[in-house]
Amino acid sequence: MKAKICKIGARILLLAIGLNLWLPLHAEETPVAKAALSASESTNSVHGDLKPGPDAGRIAFWTARLLQDYQYLRRPFDASISTRVFEAYLSSLDPQHVHFLQSDLNDFSAYRTNLGSRTLNFRREADTTPAYEIFTRYMQRLKEHVDYVDELLKTEKFEFTAEDRLMLNRHDLPYPKDLAEAKQIWHDRLRYEYLMEKINRETRKTNDVAAATPSEAHLTLTNSDGGTMAVPSEMPGTIAGEKPSQPKTMHEEIVESLSKSYHRQLRVFNDYESSDVLNVYLEAIARSYDPHSDYEGPMDYEDFAMQMNLSLFGIGAVLQAKDDYVTIEELMNGPAKLSKKIKVGDRIVAVAQSNKPPVDIYGMPINKAVRLIRGPKGTEVRLTIVPSGAPDTAKQVVSIVRDEIKLESGEAKGKILEMPDASGNKVRMGIIDLPSFYATIDSQGNPTPKSTTADVKKLLKKFREQKVAGVILDLRRNGGGSLEEAIRLAGVFIKEGPVVQIKHWDGEIEVREDTDPSIDYSGPLIVLTSRFSASASEIVAGALQDYGRALIVGDTSTFGKGTAQQLFSLVKVPALAELGHDPGTLKLTNSKFYRASGASTELRGVLADIVLPSLWNDSTDVGESTLENHLPWDTIESSTYEKVNMVQSDLGELTKRSGARVATNSEFGYLREDIARVQKERADKTVSVNEKQQLKDREELIAQHKEREQERAKHKVTAPTEYDLTVAQASQAGLPKPNSGTNDVSSAESDSLIPTRVNDGDELTEAVGSEAEHAEAARLGETENILMDYIQMSKQGPAKSNAPMLAQ
């Protein structure tokens, strides 16, 4: 039967809480026998066993109820879903299958198929004790693991001469059958971690010694009066008048570092509160229906809103956890920077709210520390800091008044390139880098609402003013966001018509259209995608491909997330509204996306018209198909829309020219070598725990990188003139100063999910990161070449074979 078609706004999903909701019959519950641990598997007690909070049962009941009744598939919380939840909860605590034992699974086996009846019952009060009992057992095993590591670090003579290998990723392997097998796994993993620490320290020490000069070998500390003093580097952590401590051996340093790392992990879980366990359990329930349904606690929703709004209220600092300290990694435009009392590298050790006493955050999980530092605009927060480079005792208190912080790094950004064509005439091309589809969630509470489409329009307006002949919309790093913004953005490039079809659980299909006949840009357009382009990105790319409006260039396909989620605040449930606190938010998959042509974007994503070499083209590590409980790919009837066919006639020639360039481009040659190496490593799935082999592999990669850099230096050419544009600059007259003319990739945008250079003295990290940046720069450069060909063809038919190749 033909599905009904609904226009925009004609159908609103109503979650009718409390109105004739179906209630399952109460089922008999089988209690889990508390199996006693054998003497060999006993352990010291961890923190007091957590128990369900007074509201846990009601929150769990309504979360599961909404999922059962309103998730896209409308699946009952039966034995099959219960099994998924059971396994998902175990894996969320122990993703590498190294802690839980087979005996643990046996002890909890009765829970495997009856979690549904325990959660959805006539009392509307779920029994969440299984989650807490399983968590307590996990804590027991984790404590055993850390105790065993402590023992090994004291007694083990670490040697790495045998030709043994380790399976690092155990996610798909069985849990250890007993404690003896678990200890062998723990032992093997610790050996590998020790080896990596040893190699990294040895190579870093060698690099530091080679790089240091007498004038550089000191540590600068800042005095309270603003002056500085130098401390010799051979006396780290000392100041005048103090006796220098005896330097640690490398073995002692490694043991200390590994011990801290393991105890830090134990402390993170040891700090869990009852609500944290409930959050993890409800996430497991939600994701057992599909990979994108989710439960979010109050703080999680705050983080989501911050990402969508591109703003937060705080001090304006990027924080990172380093050796149990919360360290200032970067200062943004905000109160911390304006105070001039905080700098990069400072360590925050305590946080106080207004007139309240300070809270010690040393060793606190970074997410909890951040939430103490954030707060409402205009409120005071007092930070106790240890200045960068100073001893731990050099503490000072800084008072800061919180303000709104704009997350400008998440905004759309523009770039204008200027280069000669085959005739020597200057041609300008525009690039829009769009990291996400952001939109202000609460416009009433935000004085400066954000809109992806509004920002892109400003950049396009600047492009038109500057006579740009072609545009690249870069969605390589874009994981999605607002559906409304995706629809509006697609409408920027087409006259009007359907952008996406949305199929609801009952088969009803809603066609979401661009109803604005105006077009902000009508010239040659390329959408650059990758395996990390997902959700809203795929809607835009798919719509522009269906209309023949844009050429899709990039990885073989995009991520393949073709489902839509609705946020539902649980406080709207009458039974939860009376709790007196925020019970969290449910992100519910309630529909499925289809392109205007009728093809789903689920699993298959959007296929590129021109495929460029990539580490991810044949990857089994990235994409919707790698996620559990994904929905199937299918098709529905096509919408009615008018194709503009701006691409198809030139596609063959564009593909041919690009293929010829890629075949002879040295950067793509290097990338093909890297692809072959990575594919071999993926097929092996194990890593060597032989020191000579590790050093050999490392040295080969570093030597290969240095050889490539020498070849690159021989062929440096002048890059096109580049003008970087922020959204704010797009509204100003003229153009900013051009970037320096070089083909160095230090400023190139690389995929955020590909390793990038880290300036920590680790040659291998820098080499791998640099090669990833070169690869992405080459892919962007070839996309620019394709656009130049496309521009010429759009003006004068097929361009001559001597079309210029842009610097890469």
Image (cartoon, rainbow, N blue to C red):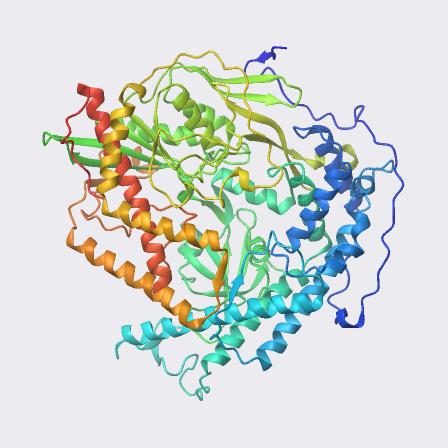
Q: Name, please, the residue furthest toward the front.
A: 163
What residue is rendered at 37% in x and 59% in y? Answer: 758
- What is the x, y in percent for residue 755? 40, 53
Q: Decide: is 140 above or below 436.
A: below
Q: Can residue 517 be seen at all in this image of the molecule?
A: yes
Q: Position of residue 648 (x, y in %)?
A: 32, 20
Q: Is residue 53 visible?
A: no
Residue 761 occupies quadrant: bottom left
- Quadrant placement of the N terminus: top right
Left/right of residue 667 with respect to residue 187 in the rendered view: left
Left or right side of 506 for 412: left
Q: Nearer the viewer, residue 337 or 371?
A: 371
- Would you place residue 320 above or below residue 217 in this image? above
* Residue at figure coordinates x 59%, y 21% from the top left: 503
Total labels: the figure holds 0
When asked about the image quadrant of residue 115, the answer is top right
- Residue 133: x and y in percent read 78, 56
Query: Is the C terminus in the top left, top right, bottom left or bottom right quadrant?
Result: top left
Residue closer to the observer: 159 or 437: 159
Residue 222 place in picture, x, y as percent: 38, 72
Camera-nearest residue between 597 and 751: 597
Question: Which quadrant holds residue 302?
Answer: top right
Q: Is residue 529 left or right of residue 97?
A: left
- The residue located at (63%, 20%) in the rendering is 12
Which residue is farthest left? 424
> In this view of the protein, which residue sits in the foreground, 397 or 280?
280
The answer to whether residue 767 is left or right of residue 709 is right
